[in-house]
Image (tube, rainbow, N blue to C red):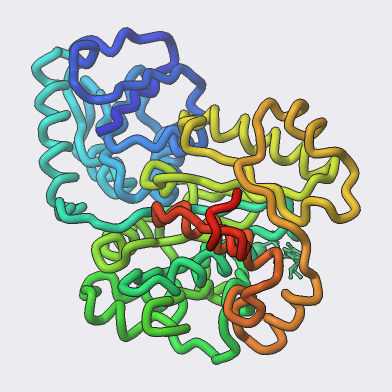
Amino acid sequence: MHIVCYTPEPWSGGALAGERHRVSCLTGPLVALASRVATASPDLLIVRGFAAGEALIEQLEALVSLRPLAVVALVLPQADPELLLRLMQAGVREVLPSEEPATILAAVQRAEARLGRSVPTRPEQAGRCLAFMSAKGGDGGTAVAANLAAALAREPDTRVLLIDLSLPFGDADMFLCSQTQASDLADICGEMERLDGALLGQMVTQVSDTLHLIPSPGRLDKLVRIQSAQVKQLLALALREYQFVMMDMGDGIDPVRLDLLEKLEHLFLVTSLSLSSLRRSGQLLLMLDGLEFSGAKVSLVGNRVGESQDIAQADFEKAIGMALARQLPGDGAGLKESVARGTPLVTLRPKSPLARGIVDWANALLGKTTGKSSPWRLFAIK
Ligand SMILES: Nc1ncnc2c1ncn2[C@@H]1O[C@H](COP(=O)(O)OP(=O)(O)O)[C@@H](O)[C@H]1O
Ligand SMILES: [Mg+2]
């Protein structure tokens, strides 16, 4: 559990210092509470040292709308019943009369029990969760994620789900199929109370037997109904039903995507070798670092490498301080045809260099070694 304390002046965390949970103590003014705490992604928030009043209630309300699952505990030595009611309405779960170690630890235990109940986790999670972000819109994050999903799903018994979280208005469906989708991410999140594997199977778009898609909603009114807690629950269920759950995260971050970072096995940042993408890649890597997202879980994927590019690969890598983990060539004509026909490129033109690069990548993810197709192999000539 991640416990975040928010206080106006530095606080040691008292009893929390020796706790087995991850504890972050943030110091800041009241006006920054909601934004700073939401970014820190707490499971339990302990707020102390602020006077109870409208400003505090406003901040807590804003925070709870950004992070509905977090348990909020407020240290408040005195509170009249009317104030208590207002605080509860604002989403505060616990009002603690003191900072005594026993009081704080009891609140931690209650939060743990509550979170354990509200986010049921089954141990048999089998799936792998991979996310794709574009350094800049147009760099190819969606084309790459969709085709890698299709390449993985060609393997027998490998069930793959692609969730289009490139909000608002993702377009992953264009690279996979031409059918109109009955249910999108907002519809599926709306059924979360009763969603199980069977219902999920009925609501996803079936691109093939093993490749399923959850498209993003195309209407703003649906978009605003998607809650971060619902998407987290959906992901937990999907990871039990599919071998790979891939997420197109678009080129930005919002509370929904922020909350999913901790669930990722790996994040692939897809970038072209342009100066503006170099700058955006650097900014995104810094942001991820600031969010304590492990650098070991991020890789850079160069897209359209070798096409007209502003900067040589070696210079790009030197500037960003990271080598490209994968380099994919350009195939504008192939992708155009793929979108026009509603068929993934890896199926439509499996021999194109781009499709091959993606299939190689899929094989590496599946732990398969790719044999080169050279006829000389028959004679064991290297
Ligand atoms: N390797 C590539 N070669 C040629 N065109 C590409 C390549 N990758 C993506 N594209 C094209 O670039 C455009 C933007 O790609 P898209 O995946 O939608 O970008 P993003 O999701 O990063 O905004 C699309 O028209 C797509 O077909
Ligand atoms: Mg996209």
Identify the residue shown where x is 85% and y is 40%: 275
Q: Position of residue 321 (x, y in %)?
A: 68, 26
Looking at the rendering, which quadrant does residue 284 occupy? Answer: top right
Q: Position of residue 317 (x, y in %)?
A: 73, 32
Apparent side of residue 123 relative to residue 133 in the rendered image (left or right): left
Apparent side of residue 216 relative to residue 1 in the rendered image (left or right): right
Identify the residue shown where x is 23% and y is 71%: 193
**Does residue 61 appear anywhere in the picture?**
no
Q: Relative to residue 220, is residue 279 depicted above or below? A: above
Looking at the rendering, which quadrant does residue 355 occupy? Answer: bottom right
**Does residue 119 appear anywhere in the picture?**
yes
Identify the residue shown where x is 77% and y is 38%: 278
Question: Between 25 and 332, which is closer to the camera in this rendering?
Answer: 332
Q: Position of residue 336 (x, y in %)?
A: 76, 78
User: Where's ligand 2: which quadrant?
Assistant: bottom right
Apparent side of residue 318 relative to residue 98 in the rendered image (left or right): right
Apparent side of residue 133 relative to residue 126 in the rendered image (left or right): right
Question: Between 212 and 307, which is closer to the camera in this rendering?
Answer: 307
Q: Relative to residue 103, is residue 131 depicted above or below? A: below
Q: The N terminus is located in which quarter? A: top left
Q: Position of residue 115 (x, y in %)?
A: 19, 45
Identify the residue shown where x is 74% and y is 58%: 329
Q: Relative to residue 77, is residue 221 depicted above or below? A: below
Question: Between 41 and 105, which is closer to the camera in this rendering?
Answer: 41
Query: Looking at the image, how many numbered discs can be counted on the residues?
Result: 0
